[in-house]
């Protein structure tokens, strides 16, 4: 009797004459007989090929399957591996998709392996985010002393964002009274990603006007 051991994709086929003994290696590493089939050598080879096609590959991604990176940073592929039973088929995996780190958004990188006519896929999701708040700069001093609560001379402010650019027109200005001698002017701006910045100008009410002396008669 001709005896031939074939280890194919985690399964063992022993051809003995016209009989095929199918084995499967369990978690303990022991061979477990699945079936005994009587067939010719050509049929046995066909069975081996079918087993290879029917097995599902396992594509494993290195790193996280869901990533978050800041806008304008660099995306680096973390790597991947693929196995079809006991065989390493990493080189047969194709990678598709692109991450544009200059644009905030959600991107998918797809890892595909074709086995026969069927294509198996695994996806990594990369979120490019903007979490940097805008920067507000006050025109003038951030602390001002005035003599009248009705002071309305607003110096204004400017705002810029790392992603959205110029946001000065989006600044919202509110006033908040602290007490009879102080109040705050609050400047708030929010970018398109929802990042919010606030800056305060302090106003102090104080008598800073010198008295006027008027002479009677000739000086």
Image: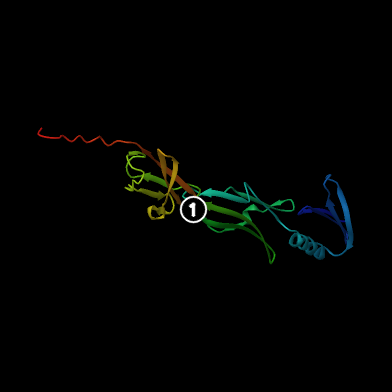
Quadrant in the picture for residue 34: bottom right
In the image, taking residue 6 as reference, residue 83 lies left or right, namely: left
Considering every residue shown, the one lying at the far left of the view is 218
Instruction: Characterize the local packing of mark 1: few (<14), some (14-19) or many (20 or more) Cα atoms within 10 angstroms.
Output: some
| Vertical side of 174 occupied by 206: above or below | above
In the rendered image, residue 46, in percent from the top left (x then y), is placed at 78, 64
Task: Determine the residue located farthest toward the top in the rendered image.
Answer: 219
Left or right, residue 105 beside residue 119: left
On the image, numbered disc 1 is attached to which residue? 101
31 or 73, which is in the foreground?
Answer: 73
Residue drawn 50% across and 55% down? 104
Please say if 134 is above or below 218. below
Picture coordinates of residue 50, whole percent (x, y): 77, 63
Point out the image quarter for the C terminus: top left
Occupied quadrant, residue 210: top left
Left or right, residue 119 beside residue 17 = left
Out of 45 and 132, give the one closest to the viewer: 132
Give the secondary structure at mark 1. Answer: loop
Q: Residue at x 34, y 36 (%)?
A: 206
Viewer-side residue, 109 vs 7: 109
Which of the two residues, 13 or 118, is positioned nearer the viewer here?
Answer: 118
Residue 157 sits above or below residue 98 on the image: above
Q: Is residue 171 above or below residue 44?
A: above
Q: Residue 123: x, y in percent?
A: 63, 56
Q: Quadrant of residue 23?
A: bottom right
């Amino acid at each position: 009797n001709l005896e031939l051991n074939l280890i194919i994709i985690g399964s063992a086929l022993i051809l003995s004459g016209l009989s095929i003994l199918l084995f499967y290696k369990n978690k303990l590493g022991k061979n477990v007989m699945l079936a005994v089939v009587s067939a010719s050598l050509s049929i046995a080879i066909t069975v081996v090929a079918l087993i290879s096609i029917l097995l599902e590959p396992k594509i494993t991604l290195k790193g996280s399957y869901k990533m978050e990176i800041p806008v304008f940073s660099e995306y680096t592929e973390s790597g991947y591996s693929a196995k079809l039973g006991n065989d390493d088929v990493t080189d047969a995996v194709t990678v598709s998709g692109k991450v544009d780190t200059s644009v905030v958004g959600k991107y998918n990188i797809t890892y595909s392996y074709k086995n026969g006519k069927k294509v198996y896929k695994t996806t990594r999701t990369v979120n490019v985010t903007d979490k940097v708040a805008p920067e507000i700069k006050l025109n003038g001093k951030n602390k001002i002393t005035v003599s009248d609560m009705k002071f309305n001379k607003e110096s204004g402010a400017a705002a810029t964002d790392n992603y959205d650019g110029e946001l000065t027109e989006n600044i919202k200005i509110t006033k908040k009274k602290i007490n009879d001698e102080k109040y705050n002017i609050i400047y708030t701006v929010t970018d398109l990603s929802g990042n919010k910045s606030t800056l305060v100008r302090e106003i102090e009410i104080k008598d800073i006007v010198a008295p006027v002396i008027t002479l009677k008669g000739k000086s």
